[in-house]
Each structure stands twice: as C-alpha cells, then as structure tokens.
Image: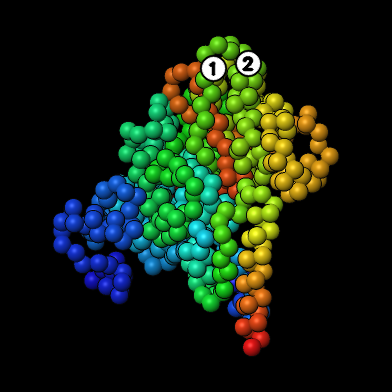
Amino acid sequence: MSALADLLDATGAALEAEDDFDALNRLYCEKGWSDGLPLVPPSEQRVGDMLAYWDRPLAEPVAKIAPRWGEATPVRLAANAVMAGCRPEYFPLFVLAVEALCEESFNLYGIQTTTHQCAPLVMVNGPIGRELAINSGHNAFGPGHPANATIGRAIRLALVNIGGALPGIGDMSTFGSPGKYSYCVAENEAASPWEPLHVERGFPEEATTVTVIGAEGPHNVNDHESVTGKGILTMIAGTMAIPGANDATLGGGEPVIVLGPEHAATVATDGYSKQDVKRFLYEHGQVPLARFSEEYIERRLKKRFPERFAAAGVGAMIPLVKRAEDFMVIVIGGAGKHSAFIPTFGTTRAVTRMLRRRDGQPARSVSELRAQ
Amino acid sequence: MAELHKRGIVAVVACSTPFVNLGRIQSAQLGAPGLPLLVIPHPVGGIALDQVRERAEVFAAQVIEFVKGRMA
C-alpha cells in the first residue's frame, strides 16, 4: 500500500462515493466544501498525481489555517488543488502561498473573519511563474489563464475547507469580493523599467517567490492625457486619496500601486526610481481630513488615534502608510494607459516566500520539485 | 479570554448577534468551548451614543447574572 493510501485509510480521511460528477458536486455544496462553482472530484489517483510535486513528508502539516486552525496537510492541500482544477505542476507554488498566508504578520485570522472585503492577493515573481504561464500581461487580474485561475481558486478552497471561512460563520465579510474566487497574478518583469518586487524585497533575481497581500480589488487609474511622470503620478495619487480605505485610518498595511507598462515607462523615462515613485505618492496621495465626516473624526479618529488626530485641523492630511517604503510598486498588464491602486486590510503585512529545492537553493524549474 | 477561561479565571465575551457562530467556533478551536458568549444586539458600530448605552446595559445585566450564578 502506498503512503497516500495509508493516510486515506484513516477514519474520516476519505469518502467513498459513486463516480457521478453531478451527485458529487451536489454533495460538496451540501457539505460546504465549495466556492459555488463545479469542482473536480479529488480521487485518490488525482490527489496522488498532485503529490508527485511534493518532496516532503505527506502527513506533516505545513501550516494551520485560521479561523478553524485546520491543519493544512499536503494531502488536504492536494485535494483542494485538485478540486480547483490545478495541474500538478502548480502544487509547489500553491503550497508556498498557503505557508506565506499563515505567517503571523499577515494576520490571516483578521483577513478571514473581518467584515471588510479584503482577500489574499498572490503575486508571483521569477522564472517558475513564467514557466507555469501565470499571466502578467493583458487581463492579468481577469480570466483566461489556467494557472492564475486555479492557483487562486485552490487558495480560496483551502481557506474555506481547511480554514473554515464559510460565509456568515468563519467569513463575516459584509460584501465579500470577486477576488475571493481567485486572486493570483505575476509581475510583468519584462515590461518593468525597475527591479522586480522580489529583488526589492531581498531575494535573488533568479528566485521564484510568492508575495501575499491582504487586499481589496484593484481600483483603476485611467490616464490617457498625462505625458510626464509627474502627471501620471499625480493622477494615481489623487485616486489613492480615499477616506473609506482601511489604509487611511489604520495605516499598517502595504498598499499596492500597479503601474501598467506604458505608464511605468513614462514615469521611469522621466527619471523616477521606484523609491522616487513611493516618495511622490506618500507626499501627494494623502487624504484631506475634511473628506471625513465630522462624526468619523470625533468618534473614531480623535479617540482611537489621539496622537495623530487630537490636534488635527480640517486642513490636516492623512497619509495611507507610516513610511513611503511601505507602498509596493509593481508593473503588471498589457498595452493601455491604465494603472491601478490596491488598498489593503490595513492591519496586515505582506509576506514573501521563495520556492526552494530540497537543498535550500532557489528552484529554477518546477521539474526540480518533483518527488524523488 | 479563552486563555483566562482555561486558567479558571471568570471571563466572558460580548458578541453581537451575527458573530455568535464565529465566537462559538473560535472558543471551541481555542480549547475553551465553555467560554460564555454574552449576546448583545447588532450593530455595535455606527450607532448613536444612547444605543451604545442600551447595549452596555444589556451586557452589564448579563455579566451580573453570570457572576451571581458563579457565586451561588
């Protein structure tokens, strides 16, 4: 008997069911194991195929997922990856993202249970993202690419099925978000005039990383008119200055500025480094206190943050982050004069993790991650 | 609160109605399934101060009953 068969033999580890796609999908919905879309039945064969890309012990949990604190074992994760439609070669990146989500500084408990509409955004950098064809170009946040669609979906299923993020029970979001179906993209490194995100965050250029962000959906910045870096950044700063974003009053997140490649090229040609972009947006992307209601200022801002707001006049400006360096600047997308702003949950830190081979070195190809 | 409860220290949690299920699941997951959840009307945010006071009174009355029960 294989190691997987041994594990599935344990009480409650597997479910005997007739091989009937429709009946199985009704069962998944009844059990609350679904995101509402049809799921691929996680047969022993398919789970085994997924685990061909797992070279660590099968029974050893990689994390515990809040709020249920369910153990994310490789077998459970593989079952969810199968259900989401992942190809086996996506599995190492998916597991890496789950590990990153469960680091304390990410605050997954808060992100899962909050009434806010945030969802984990998975940002991929490096060669294996390209090998797996994770879309970083046209429609990167939208549908059409299996890796984006199914890795993001597998994360949601793991958060529901292992973490217990059932709507109205473990996931109390007032609205939810389309990003809770799937929210996975890669940076368009080839189109970026700057160093990629993972290099900026201290990883080697040849490494593949995931960066997880507790994020709202992208807010578009349409600017077909500005022909200077200053002009484009002024439009982005104006779009960012919104009083309803958690970042405006909590200020503990790392909001993301997504520059479309054409905007990025104009900004870089005018001499702005990434750090310059961050400083500009810190200075110009602040929210005037006058845009908050009087009640909001009196009841929340002055009482909860007296050091910042007790003496603030109506002309005061509220930065979205504590330091300009807290902004994340990345390049994503295809042709077009658009950028985007992604606010965060506000009390979350982005976590970046590197895909490693068994010897600890950066994996260069997903084929290096196959079980021996 | 779960930690206090597990150590035998009297502890209660105020919970507005939609969050009762989450509270029950969490207390069980944290090893304190008997942690009392005292339910107050929803919402707690975005209400006038007299409504805040009403909820505080609902909560305080439950706390008093709970403590009396523990002392009986």
Residue at image coords 67%, 65%: B57
Q: Which mark is residue A352?
A: none
What whole-number distance in Å separates the C-alpha atoms at marks 1 and 2?
9 Å
In the picture as drawn, the residue positioned furthest to the right comes out as A311
- Closer to us: A226 or A345: A345
| Residue A119, horizontal then vertical, whole percent | 49, 45
Residue indicated by mark 2: A231
Q: Is residue A236 above or below residue A208?
A: above
Q: Does dot 1 land on a helix, a strand or a loop?
A: loop
Q: Residues at marks 1 and 2, common chain?
A: yes
- Closer to us: A253 or A176: A176
A135 on left or right of A290: left
Q: Is residue A101 above or below residue A186?
A: below
Quarter holding residue A131: top left
Residue A58 visible from this viewpoint: yes
Q: Could you tell which of marks 1 and 2 lies nearer the N-terminus?
A: 1
A216 on left or right of A8: right
Residue at image coords 49%, 47%: A174
Quarter holding residue A133: top left
Q: Which mark is residue A223?
A: 1
Amino acid carrying mark 1 in the image: Asp
Residue A100 visible from this viewpoint: no
| Residue B1, horizontal then vertical, whole percent | 63, 70
Q: Is residue A45 above or below residue A190?
A: below
The reply to whether the C-beta atoms of the residues labelled 1 and 2 are less than 8 Å apart is yes
| Residue A153, horizontal then vertical, whole percent | 37, 46
Q: Does dot 2 land on a helix, a strand or a loop?
A: helix
Residue at image coords 40%, 42%: A182
Give the position of the C terminus of chain A as an image quadrant. bottom left
Quarter holding residue B64: bottom right
Residue at image coords 45%, 26%: A333
Specify the subunit that label 2 lies on: A
